[in-house]
Image (tube, grey):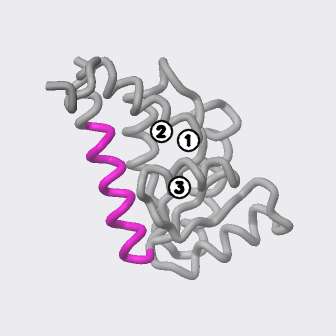
Amino acid sequence: MSLIKLQQITHEINELKYQGELGVPILIEGRKDEEALRELGVQGPFIKVSGSMMGLSEIALQAANASRVIILTDFDRKGSELAKRLYADIQSLGANPDLRIRRRLMGMTRKYIKDIQSLPSYIERLKLEVCPYPLDNI
């Protein structure tokens, strides 16, 4: 089960990497989320919602400059409410907000983590479950 989950999460991370390379903005909550995604090899561009001097409507306006935007807020209640509001605001401005990666990651990890910044450590735990002993000892 851990191997399948690891493969599915890796697929979603690879999709984020690809979209970032294409220049698709990724809306995240804050600096720690960006650090976690960069640790996983996702290069952005990132738009941080929390800690920004801009309000949500200004962030939505900035995000709507791209034809497509990925919303990747945390999996807790606050992150879900934020995702819904951003989705509605960005869509009303004529851009295409994408919640699919967030929904899939949330579905796979909801019981275990509640935020994006916990993804790297969760992935490491899955790797240890799949292969508890270092392969270089073989």
Residue 123 spot, x, y in % from top left = 40, 33
* Magenta segment includes 10: yes
What mark, if any, has residue 120 been given in the picture? 2
Name of the residue lying farthest toward the right: 53
Residue 86 spot, x, y in % from top left = 63, 57
Name of the residue lying farthest toward the front: 137
What mark, if any, has residue 116 been given in the picture? 1
Badge 3 vs badge 1, beta-carbon distance below 8 Å:
no
Q: For residue 23, what is the image quadrant? A: bottom left
Please tell me which residue lies in front, 71 or 31. 31
The answer to whether residue 131 is above or below residue 51 is: above
Q: How many marks?
A: 3
* Magenta segment includes 126: no
Of the residues tagged 3 and 2, which is closer to the observer? 2
Image point (63%, 31%), residue name: 76
Determine whether, in the image, residue 4 is placed left or right of residue 61: left
Q: CA distance from mark 2 to mark 1?
A: 9 Å
Indicate which disc, 3 or 1, sits on the residue closer to the N terminus: 3
Residue 22 spot, x, y in % from top left = 37, 76
Within-10-Å neighbours for mark 1: few <14, some 14–19, many 20+: many
Name the secondary structure under disc 3: strand
Magenta segment boundaries in residue numbering: 8-23
Q: Which residue is mark 3?
A: 71
Please tell me which residue lies in front, 115 or 80. 115
Determine whether, in the image, residue 65 is placed left or right of residue 55: left
